[in-house]
Amino acid sequence: MTGNNDTGPNAPAQRTPQQPAQKAQKDQRYLEARRLLEAGAVADRRALAENTKTRPEVLYYLAEDADRQVRKKVATNDNTPHQADMILTTDPDEEVRVELARKIARLVPGLPDLEQEKLRTRICTVIERLAQDSLPKVRAILAEEIKNSTAVPKSVVLQLARDVEETVACPILEYSPLLNDDDLKEIIAAGLTENALVSVARRETVSEDLADDVAATLEIPAVAALLANPNAQIREETLDSIIDQAREVKSLHRPLAMRPSLSIRAMKRIAGFVASALVHHMINANALENSAAENILERVRARIMSERVDDTEAQRLLEQARDYHARGMLDDAFIVNGIENNQRELLIQCLGVMADIDAKVVRQILHSKSGRAVTALAWKAGLSMRTAFQIQTELALVSPSQLVAAKNGETYPLDDSEMVWQLSYFTE
């Protein structure tokens, strides 16, 4: 007889021996979870809430548990269903929402790779809700994690970019690829804090139009950040306007002088008011030919000659230099610090005291354009050759063709007799 045989091609599939056991085990876990929900202690509910094998419907129930620690564990559980996450976005406990924000933030980098559109939409829905959270910490966590993403809703990015809290807005304004020039210009026009403007100025790419808007705010830190950004495109007219303002704003001197690819015209204008040390850096950064460099240096020398202090101030600085010398403060570090802080007149007095040479002679040596004479002055003052070179380039503004470099990178290249002779030209 074959009628009772279930071995033909259309016979129902045989259930493997493990399937009933697996189902029974799963049902048993569910029954145990229900028992713990209904009669279990808080510790049992917390254990259920953090277990990634807990059934979604159980986690959904626990999302409204009276115990905040239970809800926090549900918020951190990657297996928590979307409906439960949405409940937690309005949880009365701030830390629960913070933990939820951290979990959702971890999922953001994987959004572009999610094949399930429904899952992507659900995550974005939670992100939109968290972006409206009343707690700045929640919004800041979200902003930090989505700042580089192209997969999140642009509406969320725009909302966070306009946030009144800098910890929220700044990461988005500086990094988000979803913000275009029109978005940023509109946000600037609506008004931004100082640090938020700095974030815009630091963006990976800043167009000429956007640079115009940043510069027009006259916010010094933002303009400084714009100048320091090598990828910021700044029109010559805009740069001229910044130079006009910078003359009286010392905090703009360094970023202006260090701005890459400056025109000769711009460099000449900048050299008219920044410290001599910055002029040296500006010339080096733009790799000027000797003739062009000398032209700029000559202008600076002429300016310096016209900026001498009066006799009363000179006497005060001399007494200050003598006091520093008596206290053992005059050394290489002191001189270098003075150069970097543009303390030219004080340094002239200090070098005179250290070398036992009248300040007028020190001034003559520094204005001589002679790298050898300046090197000899530094040697007489007991300074290192490294400092001597810095005095040549940043204080005396010696032309590149006349610079005296160190021997083997650290020692004086001239012998003592030659340096004595160099000084005698000015002292005898």
Image: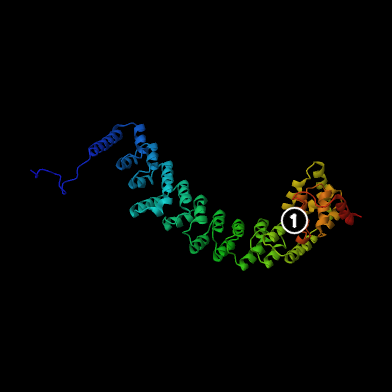
Residue 348 x/y as whole percent: 81, 52
Choose between 196 and 234: the one closer to the eye: 234
Q: Quadrant of the N terminus?
A: top left
Q: Residue at x 80, y 44 (%)?
A: 324
Residue farthest toward the front in the current orientation of the protein: 1
Residue farthest toward the right in the current orientation of the protein: 428
* Label tally: 1
Residue 30 x/y as whole percent: 27, 37
> Where, by quadrant of the figure, is residue 201 drawn?
bottom right
- Residue for badge 1: 394
User: Quick check: 376 left or right of 128?
Assistant: right
Residue 72 x/y as whole percent: 40, 40
User: Quick check: 329 left or right of 197?
Assistant: right
Q: Quadrant of the C terminus?
A: bottom right
Q: How is the structure coloured here?
A: rainbow
Residue 66 x/y as whole percent: 35, 37
Whether residue 32 is visible to the viewer of this picture, yes or no, is yes
Residue type at mark 1 is: Glu
Choose between 416 and 218: the one closer to the eye: 416
* Tag 1 secondary structure: helix
> Where, by quadrant of the figure, is residue 209 drawn?
bottom right
Q: Residue at x 63, y 65 (%)?
A: 239
Q: Residues within 10 Å of mark 1 (few under 14, many from 20)?
A: many
User: Quick check: 250 left or right of 124?
Assistant: right
Whether residue 316 is visible to the viewer of this picture, yes or no, is no
